[in-house]
Image (cartoon, rainbow, N blue to C red):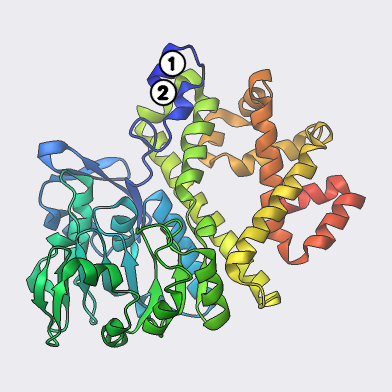
Amino acid sequence: MAIRARERGYPYWRTITTGKSTGIPHDTYGLLDSGELFGLFDQAEQGVDLQIDGQSVLLTDDMEDIYAKIGGKILTSGMTTSCVMSSFRTLINYHDEKEENLNMMMTGGPDGDLGANEIQSYKGKICLLIDGGSILFDPDGLDKKELMKIGFQRNSNPRLNSLAFADDKLGPRGFKVQLSAKNITLPDGYVVEDGAMFHRNFITDPATRKYIELANIQAFIPCGGFKDTINAGNVKSFVEIFQELKFIVEGANVFFDDASRRYIASHTQIKQIKDSSANKGGVFSSSIAEVLTAFLLQDDYEETLLNDTPTRWSLIRDIMNLVDKYASMETEMLLRLHDMSPQIPLFDLSEISSEQIFAFQEELESQLAEIVKDRELVWQVLNNYIPPTLVHKLGRERIMEIMDSAELQNYRNAIISKKIASMAYYRFGLEWQGYLEKIGSQFSTALHEPFLEN
């Protein structure tokens, strides 16, 4: 599509390549606990190429080798999963919980980008995994090494789902039930007559409570599943089965409907972060890595981003750090707002916050002619939006020249209005009316405040 746009003469054809191999793929890179940036690349019949900080350190088709290098050392992996995990970690830290102590369940498996990266990133036990292949359950925690090896395989062909999990890696109380299974006897003697039905109903069938109770599952991060898997009709059964559950962070979009979210908020103590807040790392990455970068670099895009390894990897690190930063800021702001008004569910606060930001953005758009006269403010906004690597590469003068061009003024203005609005709300959301009143009386001063150091 991007190549066709180039053939048609569209000057910004590169902006269409979001998240793909010609730009910065959303789910290829991650950060190690050491702070090093790693990437996993499919090299066809040669296997997977593990690179660390831009240097190839291993090329293999044996995932045991990959695990030996980075297994158990991954802080976060993938743009989208980094956003989800930043939201999750902010949520549990806010409530003085440790990730290592929280047994987790997930839907979506190691053959999916979000699921594979979640397996790589999570520091606690994963006790339940449900994907398109099977149900994997072990109350003592599924063998993390085995899961991660299958997850690493996602970077090659073919991808493997939970069916690849070796049966002999299950504990004495664990089981794997594939969709096609018939008349399977579980360790407690229960006979699964139909694997597909067992799979479909597992998280809403009261009969499975006996298994969930053994696992003490306190965290749920859906990474796949059908739309409205948990809905008004089955949410009551869901919460009765998962009585120990404390935290839900929605990695997969629309796994819950609003009726189920409202029931969970009003009938349980579960803290739930909505998908619209938790799952936008990929969109953010695309807007920065491809759209912004293509506008700024223009015909130097290939040479600077694709062929300049140090610059490319530095930019990726910047973007992952920004994903983490803004996901954490939004989640903490929602939690603080919820503390102030506990009667308002967290998922409602996600929507209310978006509405407040959009409303303020519209107000700013009506006054852009005045705002852009403040050149120092314009640079403060751009400097907070543009990754440090690109600021260092191009410099203030060149960036301002590009953004002030007739072709990009609307784009620049959209960045200005949205960035001021979001940063202001993240900073002053607890006293929002007071801040809006200050905008009315001290317009210029108030616009600068979101970008001042605390």
In the displayed structure, 433 sits above or below 344; it is: above
- Going by the image, does 403 lie left or right of 368? left
Q: Quadrant of the N terminus?
A: top left
The x, y position of residue 112, in whole percent, is: 28, 52
Which residue is at 57% across, 39% downward?
386
Q: Are marks 1 and 2 in contact (CB under 8 Å)?
A: yes
Q: Quadrant location of residue 130?
A: bottom left
Pick the front one: 135 or 35: 135
The x, y position of residue 348, in whole percent, is: 62, 65
Q: Secondary structure at mark 1?
A: helix
Three-letter code, disc 2: Ala
Q: Quadrant of the C terminus?
A: bottom right
Which residue in the protein does label 2 denote? 2
Pick the front one: 167 or 27: 167
In the displayed structure, 305 sits above or below 334; it is: above
Q: Is residue 123 visible?
A: no
Q: Alpha carbon of mark 1 to alpha carbon of mark 2: how far?
A: 6 Å
Pick the front one: 86 or 225: 225
Q: Secondary structure at mark 2?
A: helix
Few, some or many residues within 10 Å of mark 2 (<14, 14–19, 20+): some
In the displayed structure, 48 sits above or below 112; it is: above
Q: Is residue 175 visible?
A: yes
Three-letter code, disc 1: Arg
The x, y position of residue 103, in whole percent, is: 33, 78
Which residue is at 13% across, 43% downward?
47
Q: Quadrant location of residue 102?
A: bottom left
Few, some or many residues within 10 Å of mark 1 (<14, 14–19, 20+): few
Which residue is at 75% across, 43% downward?
362
Which residue in the protein does label 1 denote? 6
Which residue is at 92% across, 51% downward?
441
